[in-house]
Image (cartoon, helix red, strand yellow):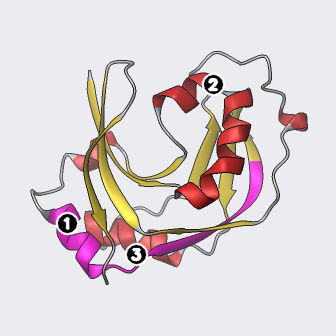
Amino acid sequence: MIRRQVTLFVPREAADAIESIRSVVDPIQKRLIPAHVTVCRDGETASLAEGHLCRCARANPSVSLQFTELEQLGGHGILLSCSHEQKGFDRLRSTLLGPTAVSKRAHITLAHPRNPRAPGNVFSNVRAELPIQITFTEISLIEQCDDSPWTVLQTFRFEG
């Protein structure tokens, strides 16, 4: 099975603290994909025309998001969730998917509930210096084949 998504990878300068948490709570997820925010999921990317991602990057400025809370998901999943002030993220989804695109709360998955629970995955022990402000300057189209690590197909720098 091949999956494609559009994503914002956490820039290197902001990634260290997040990746150190991910290595403890879900080393499988950390191995599959670096810390990121998914903009469009697999079903949504099918409607993207050739060159649309490049045009979107040229038309949009960088996206700044403030992550303000840790949330538990599906037993042992852990999300680092964005505040409800995510206009840049919503604008990006609207540019890619059209004005009727459903708004989704931006988040970074620290531990994915589909992976087995790691020994270090104890929600009450997860600590992060919140809030975390991250500015994303690039957008990427990525692909995963079966259970292999995700690969980057294209990356574009925001210019708008």
Residue found 9% across the figure and 56% down from its top: 50
Q: Which residue is mark 2?
A: 27
The amino acid beneath tag 1 is: Cys
Q: Earlier in the sequence, mark 1 or mark 2?
A: 2
For the residues labelled 3 and 2, the Cα–Cα distance comes to 32 Å
Evaluate if marks 3 and 2 touch, with contact meaning CB atoms under 8 Å apart. Answer: no
Which residue position is annotated with label 1?
54
Q: Quadrant of residue 102?
A: bottom left
Mark 3 residue crowding within 10 angstroms, few (<14) / some (14–19) / many (20+): some
Q: Which residue in the structure is indicated by mark 3? A: 91
Quarter of the figure that contains the N terminus: top left
At label 2, counting other C-alpha atoms closer than 10 Å, the crowd grade (few under 14, some 14-19, many 20 or more) is: many
Q: Which residues are magenta?
A: 52-70
CA–CA distance in space, label 1 to label 2: 32 Å
In this rendering, the label closer to the viewer, 3 or 2: 2
For numbered disc 1, what is the local secondary structure? Answer: helix
Residue 137 among magenta residues:
no
Q: Is residue 74 something one can see in this rendering?
A: no
Amino acid type at mark 2: Pro
- How far across and how far down the image is residue 113, in percent? 62, 27
The C terminus sits in image quarter: bottom left
Query: How far is disc 1 from disc 3 in space, using C-alphas?
Result: 15 Å
Can residue 10 be seen?
Answer: yes
Residue 118 in the image: state x and y as whole percent: 72, 18
As drawn, is 51 to the left or to the right of 127?
A: left
Horizontally, is 98 left or right of 78 in the view? left
Contact check, label 1 and label 2, Cβ < 8 Å: no
| Residue 60 shown in magenta | yes
Which residue is rendered at x = 47% and y = 63% of the image?
103
Q: Earlier in the sequence, mark 1 or mark 3?
A: 1
